[in-house]
Image: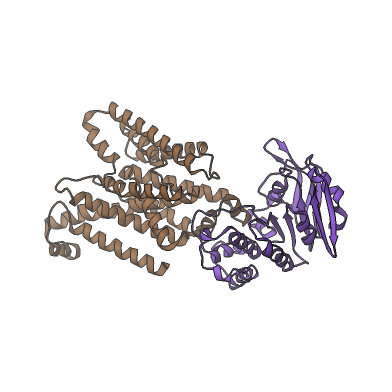
Chain colours: A brown, B purple
């Protein structure tokens, strides 16, 4: 599908699903009142629910979804493997363990982000060292290394949870499965997202060429080391920020780029913005389901993403082998 | 005339294995070099060193007078293009886009393609008879078709030195000679040269004006094809007796 069709289509979908996310929730409100609150600030209670809860939550889901999706697309380009995803390869796990360690040590809130970046960076370096670095085409080794790292981080996370006071456990657990209830701040994630998109779009052409392989791209004039640093840096920053603010939500980074590639190929000029939009759509939809399907109870949005992502991942593995 | 590339006492290693020793070699415009040698004698490594993709253990490689290690990747790509032995494409990409990627080294940071970029890549597609495949995805093509796409990409790169690592791979015997001759013919003899690693001495004699033989022990022999291509040299090169037969203008070598 051509870019001039795909992007408007995705924007329309995002608008629709966001509107649904504003209209539906654990409290049933008549659509007319919501629209009037949205446009003219009508009824005070409806206004409060809309402006203080549903709208920030929807925007938060869009930003986090976009970040995770773009981070996934970057990992796939970096590793030249459509199965790469920060969640599967342990980057999210490293960030999550970092955040929980910061929780456990009762460090101030801003330190959670630093701990997340540290954990994600450490985990990704381990991944690259043990999977034969970036040039390797050995998918098995890459995935196995990622799975082992993820398992290791899981054990560390359990360890930290066991040591933590029981009063803080529910919050930690909900954060762990990807919870959008406690949106601390929209500002930092939005800033990180907006910061990372322009460099990716400027580098769209050399990123396309990286898909040809490290050697081939270099022989055509691409500064491969610089591109790898760019991808690695932003993939880690985006993943760590999303994890620090919303918990480790899996599979957005796998599902969104995959669907976009099916529709319009692998050109990054289109892939990056389209993947960001689709990531936003997916997470808003998952969050909407989590709020409405078992209402009045709420389920973490990460659960639905994972339920969608696992079958797709299995299908991709089958097709690759 | 200034050489497009020169090797100045170059030694190459792969891991701990010593390959080429003290190679002095110059590439002049208009020449077409064939590199022959047994497996593991460093043919591919030498091509990669010329393209700045493999470090030299000793000595220096200069492109148009400048050491390779001092040039940016883009500058190297304007001097040297490389056809790899094998290509592998895990992501879908159109033939037209891939051939256009050959123009990258000549574009500005925005990567905007000028009209002449379009023209040059369209011409490359024509020379390799790929018009009918231009909109196909490369990962759906056969080995021989992919080879022609890679050759077209190399053509559109318009580098001064065209390095080809086993260009005849996957090409069926009927089209092999015609495609490679077509490739060499369209090079600008004032500004361009080509170097190809070949496994078939007869093909090398047919296509190349000069030959570089890389022996197992790291020594080498370089010169014009008529002088270098002898049954004696090939016997020494491959460690098995070679004989020559001449049929009109065509010189053939066969082992045994």
Toward the top, the furthest residue is A163
Quarter of the picture holding the N terminus of chain B: bottom right
In the rendered structure, the answer to whether residue A68 lies left or right of residue A122 reads left
Q: Position of residue B120 (x, y in %)?
A: 63, 70
In the rendered structure, the answer to whether residue A155 lies left or right of residue A52 reads right
Residue at the image position 15 percent from the left and 65 percent from the top: A36
Residue at the image position 35 percent from the left and 48 percent from the top: A251
Q: How many marks?
A: 0
Q: Position of residue B88 (x, y in %)?
A: 56, 53
Residue B222 visible in the picture:
no
Q: Quadrant of residue A297?
A: top left
Q: Position of residue B132 (x, y in %)?
A: 55, 71
Foreground pick, B62 / B252: B252
Foreground pick, B220 / B232: B232
Q: Position of residue B23 (x, y in %)?
A: 80, 46
In the rendered structure, the answer to whether residue A287 lies left or right of residue A210 reads left
Foreground pick, B168 / B93: B168
Residue A73 visible in the picture:
yes
In the rendered structure, the answer to whether residue A111 lies left or right of residue A22 reads right
Residue at the image position 85 percent from the left and 50 percent from the top: B231
């Amino acid at each position: 599908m051509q870019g001039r069709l795909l992007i408007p289509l995705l924007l329309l979908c995002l608008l629709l699903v966001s509107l649904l996310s504003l209209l539906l929730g654990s409290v049933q409100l008549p659509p007319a009142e919501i629209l009037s609150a949205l446009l003219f600030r009508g009824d005070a209670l409806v206004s409060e629910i809309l402006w203080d809860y549903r709208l920030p939550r929807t925007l938060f889901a869009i930003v986090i979804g976009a970040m995770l999706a773009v981070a996934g697309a970057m990992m796939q380009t970096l590793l030249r493997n459509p199965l790469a995803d920060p969640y599967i390869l342990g980057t999210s796990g490293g960030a999550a363990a970092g955040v929980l360690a910061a929780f456990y040590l009762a460090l101030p809130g801003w330190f959670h982000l630093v701990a997340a970046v540290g954990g994600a960076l450490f985990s990704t370096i381990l991944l690259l060292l043990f999977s034969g670095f970036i040039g390797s085409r050995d998918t098995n080794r890459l995935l196995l290394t990622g799975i082992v790292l993820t398992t290791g981080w899981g054990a560390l996370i359990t360890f930290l949870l066991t040591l933590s006071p029981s009063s803080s456990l529910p919050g930690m657990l909900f954060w762990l499965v990807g919870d959008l209830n406690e949106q601390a701040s929209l500002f930092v994630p939005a800033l990180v997202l907006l910061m990372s998109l322009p460099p990716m779009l400027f580098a769209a052409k050399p990123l396309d060429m990286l898909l040809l392989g490290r050697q081939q791209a270099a022989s055509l004039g691409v500064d491969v080391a610089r591109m790898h640093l760019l991808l690695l840096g932003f993939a880690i920053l985006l993943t760590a920020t999303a994890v620090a603010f919303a918990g480790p939500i899996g599979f957005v980074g796998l599902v969104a780029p995959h669907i976009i590639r099916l529709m319009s190929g692998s050109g990054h000029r289109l892939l990056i913005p389209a993947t960001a939009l689709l990531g936003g759509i997916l997470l808003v939809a998952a969050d909407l389901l989590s709020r409405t399907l078992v209402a009045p109870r709420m389920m973490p949005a990460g659960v639905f993403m994972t339920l969608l992502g696992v079958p797709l991942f299995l299908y991709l593995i089958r097709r690759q082998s | 005339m200034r050489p497009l590339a020169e090797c100045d006492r170059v030694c190459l290693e792969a891991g701990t294995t010593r390959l080429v020793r003290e190679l002095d070699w110059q590439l002049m415009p208009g020449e077409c070099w064939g590199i022959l040698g047994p497996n593991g004698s460093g043919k591919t490594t030498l091509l990669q060193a010329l393209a700045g993709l493999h470090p030299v253990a000793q000595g220096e490689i200069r492109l148009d007078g400048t050491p390779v290690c001092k040039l940016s990747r883009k500058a190297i790509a304007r001097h040297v293009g490389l056809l790899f032995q094998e290509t592998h494409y895990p992501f879908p990409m159109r033939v037209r886009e891939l051939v256009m990627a050959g123009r990258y080294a000549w574009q500005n940071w925005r990567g905007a393609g000028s009209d002449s970029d379009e023209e040059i890549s369209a011409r490359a597609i024509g020379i390799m008879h790929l018009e009918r495949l231009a909109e196909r995805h490369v990962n759906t093509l056969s080995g021989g078709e992919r080879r022609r796409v890679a050759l077209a990409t190399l053509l559109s790169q318009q580098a001064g030195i065209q390095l080809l690592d086993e260009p005849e791979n996957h090409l069926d015997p009927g089209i092999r000679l015609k495609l490679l001759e077509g490739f060499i013919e369209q090079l600008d003899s004032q500004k361009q040269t080509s170097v190809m690693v070949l496994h078939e001495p007869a093909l090398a004699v047919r296509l190349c004006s000069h030959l570089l033989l890389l022996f197992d022990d790291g020594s080498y022999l370089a010169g014009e094809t008529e002088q270098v291509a002898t049954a004696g040299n090939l016997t020494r090169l491959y460690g098995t007796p070679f004989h020559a037969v001449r049929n009109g203008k065509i010189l053939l070598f066969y082992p045994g």
